[in-house]
Image: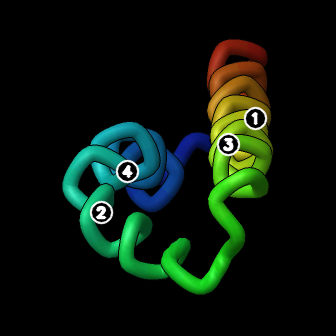
Amino acid sequence: MQYTFVSASFLPILISKPIRNAPNFATALQPVATERRAGVLLREGLIAFALLLTFNAQVTSA
């Protein structure tokens, strides 16, 4: 993948967006049972971390 403006902009947005979207995410989790929320948060965190590693690997190999 070629290192472009879009890929360079996506990583900082990916990192900073969860902090600003925490209230929205908490609201979205209200219908989810309390005992499942920790699992949902862990899963979403792992997905975001995997994306972060993928973009980092692609940028450093370019």
Question: Residue 21's mark?
Answer: 2
Give the spatial CA distance, label 2 vs label 3: 17 Å
Q: Is residue 22 above or below residue 2?
A: below
Question: Residue 38's mark?
Answer: 3
Mark 1 or mark 2, earlier in chain: 2
Q: Is residue 12 visible?
A: yes
Mark 1 or mark 4, earlier in chain: 4
Q: Are marks 4 and 3 in contact (CB under 8 Å)?
A: no
Mark 4 or mark 3, earlier in chain: 4
Residue in view at x 37 percent, y 50 percent? 18
Q: Are marks 1 and 2 in contact (CB under 8 Å)?
A: no
Residue in view at x 25 percent, y 65 percent? 23
- Given residues 32 and 45, the one toward you in this image is 32
Residue in view at x 45 percent, y 60 percent? 6
Q: Is residue 22 above or below residue 41?
A: below
Farthest residue, direction left? 20
Residue in view at x 68 percent, y 31 percent? 49
Q: Which kind of residue does numbered mark 2 sit on? A: Asn
Quarter of the image for residue 55 reads top right
Q: Nearer the viewer, mark 4 or mark 3?
A: 3
Question: Residue 46's mark?
Answer: 1
- Given residues 53 and 22, the one toward you in this image is 22
The residue identified by callout 4 is 18
Q: Is residue 24 above or below residue 2?
A: below
Farthest residue, direction front? 34
Give the spatial CA distance, label 1 vs label 4: 13 Å
- Given residues 56 and 17, the one toward you in this image is 17
Instruction: Sort mark 3 into few (<14), some (14-19) or many (20+) by Cα contacts within 10 Å.
Output: few
Q: Are marks 2 and 4 in contact (CB under 8 Å)?
A: yes
Percent position of residue 36, x then y: 77, 56
